[in-house]
Amino acid sequence: MKLQQLRYIVEVADRDLNVTTAAEHLHTSQPGVSKQIRLLEDELGLRIFERSGKHLSGITGAGEQILQRAREVLAQTGNIETFAAEARAEDKGSITLATTHTQARYALPETILNFRQQYPAVTLHMHQGAPRQIAEWASRGKADFCVATEAMELFENLVMMPCYHWNRCVLVTKDHPLTQTDKLSLQELAQHPIVTYVLGFTGRGKINDAFAQHDLEANIVLTAVDADVIKTYVRLGLGVGIVANMAYDPTQDRDLVAIPADHLFSPSTTRLGFRSDMFMRQYFYDFMALFAPHLTPEFIDQVLAARTAERREKLYATMSEQLPYMDTPAK
């Protein structure tokens, strides 16, 4: 059994059983990948993949277990490589960060700027996607860190550090009747068409929950993953926007009015996730501290030493009162 064979079966599984695509990503040939998979199966004496003719059609029950263990082996191999790299040069390397548009656009720029000034020889790679997708990337070792509000709890091998709380505001044009409201209510909001986030992005579930708890139906006419897109359609008069507070810029969005809505929706918490078995380089600790100063190396190590999810949640709870809130729009 070779590490190369484990990489091949994992890559094929991650590429929806498309051997050709997996081979391209691995910079090798399709026949070579297929041969190595067959050799591994012959050595193990069982099939990892189901076949329909010459094509892979599924993963066997035993194959699922083998793939899980292969991922663990490859993760540990990566840790050894990372340790060796740190031993050679503590201030050189890379960070692969997976996140959503909202975090990349509004929450992370200052952190990344400060980190680059502190570690100019460390390369940053940023990948954007849906919350579940980016959490999966981190879970599978495709990214070092993921930053998002939703879907982080779906992967048991991720440590999910709470970073900050945030809430929402309602965006309208300056001539909109809601600008005359002293304190916006859900009943008033339900009377207008709404433009907001796609379900599963940026705490959208909190919006649905608020209306449902008051037996109201939100008239959502358009959804998007990008707050800038939402603002564009608010400007066109398609509806009122519900966005994260951090997405409103008083200078760039001076043609819009931000109406506070913290009293309408329960707050959301953004978390930073990483694999519990990841080797922690010094600049990993420093990156997290720049993004969320309460995430000290001592606290992170304490969380990593906790053996159960329940114990980790208790540690997170002790930190909850210290979490900052992202800036809210001026009233």
Image: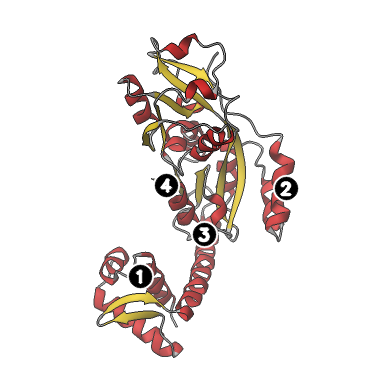
Tell me where residue 15 sits by quadrant.
bottom left
Residue 31 appears in the rendering: yes
Q: Are marks 1 and 2 in contact (CB under 8 Å)?
A: no
Residue sitting nearer the eye, 2 or 272? 272
x and y percent of residue 181 in the render? 52, 11
Confirm or deny contact between disc 2 and disc 4 (CB under 8 A): no
Res. 315 mark = 2
Considering the image in quadrants, where does the C terminus appear?
top right
**Dot 1: what SS?**
helix
Which of labels 2 and 4 is toward the front?
4
- Dot 4 or dot 1: first in sequence order is 1
Residue located 37% across and 35% down the image = 223
Cα–Cα span, label 3 and label 2: 27 Å
Q: Is residue 279 visible?
A: no
Q: Nearer the viewer, mark 3 or mark 1?
A: 1
Q: Which residue position is annotated with label 4?
A: 130
Up/down of 182 relative to 34, above or below: above
Residue holding disc 1: 12
